[in-house]
Amino acid sequence: MIQRTLGDSGIEVGAIGYGAMPLNWEYGTPVGDQEAGRVVGKALDSGVTLLDTADCYGRNEELLGRAISGRRDEAILSTKVGLVVAGEDPLTYVHDGRPSHIRLSCDRSLRRLAVESIDLYQLHRVDPTVPVEESVGAMAELVAAGKVRAIGLSEVDVPTIERARAVHPISSVQSELSLWTREALDDMVPWCVANGVAFLPYSPLGRGYLTGRLTASQIGRTDFRSQLPRFQSEAMEANRAIVEGIAVVAARHAATNAQVALAWLLAQSVRLIPIPGTKSVRYVEENAQAAALALTDADLAALDALPLPQGDRYERS
């Protein structure tokens, strides 16, 4: 697989990464240790080396740590800190960007992952009660201590990342970006490109919708997507035009919708490293093959012209 670099860290990864969250969190029935090992093993076999998780995804770090046992030197591990599950609802979070919390959480992540260092440690969300400089300062201490190799931020704006990198170099920004969520292309992606920072699009397949395989009946009550406006049956039906437009391009290349959606992201800049998640060995291999798909200018123009989605990303507060 072609390689891309996590900002100025010098850490090289496959152009397609892997988001481990669906193994056990938010998207219906979790998989067991054995199946998680098969999925992650197939990712590594396919050249997918950047493996992304977070400390708030239940036992996800433990699953990932076991899955890479014996193959640590093949994996670039990325985890996140700064969100804490609040109460009994596993999908309700509070922010905690305090330096004391970050230091303690890093040690706990290292134990769960069963590794000596984390390749990319990301602030999951900026805590509105803690200056970002303080949170990043604590993360910088972890780099100095050898516990972390590089630092990233998730879901931030340009002024915030400018403040953060005045404290320590920032190697990556992770935010949602796909053919139906393009806001990051207006400001954050251009900033990353101009400043040599990697951009990690999460949900690059529109939480599964852009694949064309997802139906409303497949989304159960325990599935996080059941709470999102775009995954209500009327919105899903209204957004079929986006899926159909991707399918037209896919047919030209004997490719899948997922591969086209990922290839579109890769074509935006060498700074982009999408991290699609899946619980399927078949789909992790399919996603990896998107790195070899070369879209034409006509393909890109057709994809750029797809209609905007109906429905917000999240419920409005």
Image: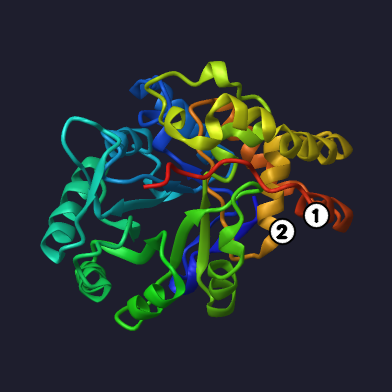
Q: Point out residue 295 in the picture as x, y percentages from the top left corner.
A: 81, 51
Asked if one can make out residue 25 in the rendered structure from this viewpoint, the answer is yes
What type is the residue that disc 2 sits on? Ala
- The residue beneath circle 2 is 267
Callouts 2 and 1 close, C-beta under 8 Å: yes
Front residue of this view, candidates 204 and 234: 234
Under tag 1, what secondary structure? helix
Q: Quadrant of residue 104?
A: bottom left
Residue at 40% in and 50% down: 73
Q: Point out residue 53 in the picture as x, y percentages from the top left corner.
A: 37, 44
Pick whichever of labels 2 and 1 is earlier in the sequence: 2
Labelled disc at residue 74: none
Report whether 99 appears left or right of 315: left
**Which residue is at the far front?**
317
- The residue beneath circle 1 is 300
Q: Quadrant of residue 297?
A: bottom right
Residue at 30% in and 62% down: 126
Residue at 25% in and 55% down: 82
